[in-house]
Amino acid sequence: MPGSSTLLSLTLLAVSASVRADYFSKDPLVDKVVPYNAIPYQVMTDTDDPRGFQSGYNQCNSSTENPQSLCQTMFVNHLDDFCLWAPPQPNTTISDSEQDEVAWCTKKGHGGRYIPAGAIQGIQMVQTQSYIQIAGYINQAMVNIGGTYGGELDSGGQDGEGNPMGGLVYTNAFPSAGGNNATYVQAQHWSFFIGDNYFCGKICDQTGSNPQGLCNNIYDRLGCEYNAPSNVENGTFTWCKGDDMTPVGTYVVNGATSVYTQPAESVSINFDQLPYTPTAAATSECTTFVSASLFTDIASVTAASGPSATGASGGSATGAGASKATGGAAGATGKASGSTTGSAAKPSGSSGAIAFGASVGGVVAGFAAVLAVL
Ligand SMILES: *[C@@H]1O[C@H](CO)[C@@H](O)[C@H](O)[C@H]1NC(C)=O
Ligand SMILES: *[C@@H]1O[C@H](CO)[C@@H](O)[C@H](O)[C@H]1NC(C)=O
Ligand SMILES: *[C@@H]1O[C@H](CO)[C@@H](O)[C@H](O)[C@H]1NC(C)=O
Ligand SMILES: *[C@@H]1O[C@H](CO)[C@@H](O)[C@H](O)[C@H]1NC(C)=O
């Protein structure tokens, strides 16, 4: 495990903008209350969205639990039992697949794909009174993620349909589930970031404090550091209780509370000039596990296809140095019109700036990354 002082830390910024920003759902995903025993085949109801319709399904069962699964219902239960959103096709970027991503799980029984053994390299899961947060290191090529750059998946999305469109999230670990593993409660507000071989996510309890604010999805360009600050270390697998963080974007300086507003997509974000640097909220009662003892269900699951298991393609300049401390995954949800390419990233240190832009399927995306040697 690299020491933090010698770690190459990567700050990256990814923005994408939908060409059509004028449509917003009449029946947004975040407002849909879907009891676990009443999940429809597809939860999306708007059929007039120019972005299209839900590509997978929400009814997931033993017949959908296979490597081609298009299950779009996922779970965050315990350290050994969670799913991530990742692309259905190999070697796909988050920005190209955000609306179509599917559930990849560490445990059998959820009707989705399995995360291959060895893909998860370290995790910290923190349960507070209001949410469950997960952050971890992942070999993202093993879950079909191509390129280096990441993005946000969330219950909002540029048109209110979510990313993936129609994605549903459940847990048996919220207090409102009553401590019974067979009882699942929906999380209406959730956000995940994945990219640069790092991921984080937060699912908020509707009966907890401020689910909209704690799982806010409007800070899609700020990555994990701001949306889900954690103390995860690569190579460790830890579950903790924790305090609620301050709502995403809210910070306190000298006793005064302020709210940071993420600028429009056309305005680059200088991470050195943000008004605050988040710190992980306090944790307690942490338990650390050996990874092999955690993921027994997927111990023999291998990556089905696509890129080799090591190293994301196209990411030569970034190597293994992604640090969660500088925002390992940045947002690509794209909520505004207009496009940006090559936005500035954290200018500290020096060396290896890489930037590229891509335009695929009506989404214009621009990326910039600066590799800083600490
Ligand atoms: C299993 O899920 C599929 C896909 O959602 C659905 O078509 C099928 O009816 C389900 N089967 C059962 C037995 O519920
Ligand atoms: C619920 O699941 C967790 C982890 O998946 C497990 O540790 C715990 O023993 C389970 N509880 C019961 C009552 O089965
Ligand atoms: C992944 O996709 C990129 C961009 O299309 C391509 O350059 C690269 O060769 C692909 N990698 C693999 C392993 O298929
Ligand atoms: C995490 O650790 C694994 C195993 O040592 C290593 O292969 C990977 O490159 C590390 N990831 C990062 C982002 O440092």
Image (spheres, rainbow, N blue to C red):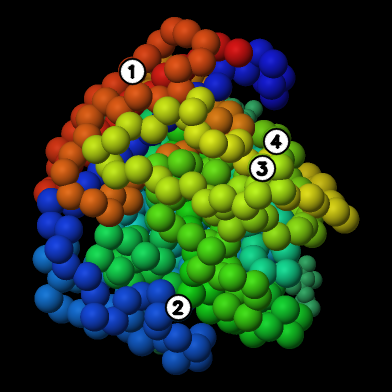
For label 2, the residue is 61
How far is mark 3 from mark 1, CA to CA? 34 Å
Res 247 seen here: yes
Q: Is mark 2 within 8 Å of ligand 1?
A: yes
- Between 336 and 237, the one lying in front of the other is 336
Furthest residue in direction bottom, as rendered: 38
Q: Is residue 99 left or right of residue 109?
A: left
For label 1, the residue is 354
Type of amino acid at the residue the image marks with label 3: Val
Q: From what the image shows, is residue 78 above or below residue 196?
A: below
How far is mark 4 from mark 3, CA to CA? 28 Å
Type of amino acid at the residue the image marks with label 1: Ile
Type of amino acid at the residue the image marks with label 4: Glu
Type of amino acid at the residue the image marks with label 2: Asn
- Between 150 and 144, the one lying in front of the other is 150
Residue 195 position in % (x across, y down):
44, 39
For label 3, the residue is 253
Furthest residue in direction top, as rendered: 351
Give SS at disc 3: strand
For label 4, the residue is 233
How far is mark 2 from mark 1, CA to CA? 43 Å
Q: Residue at x 43, y 58 (%)?
A: 217
- Between 337 and 157, the one lying in front of the other is 337
Picture quadrant where residue 370 is located: top left
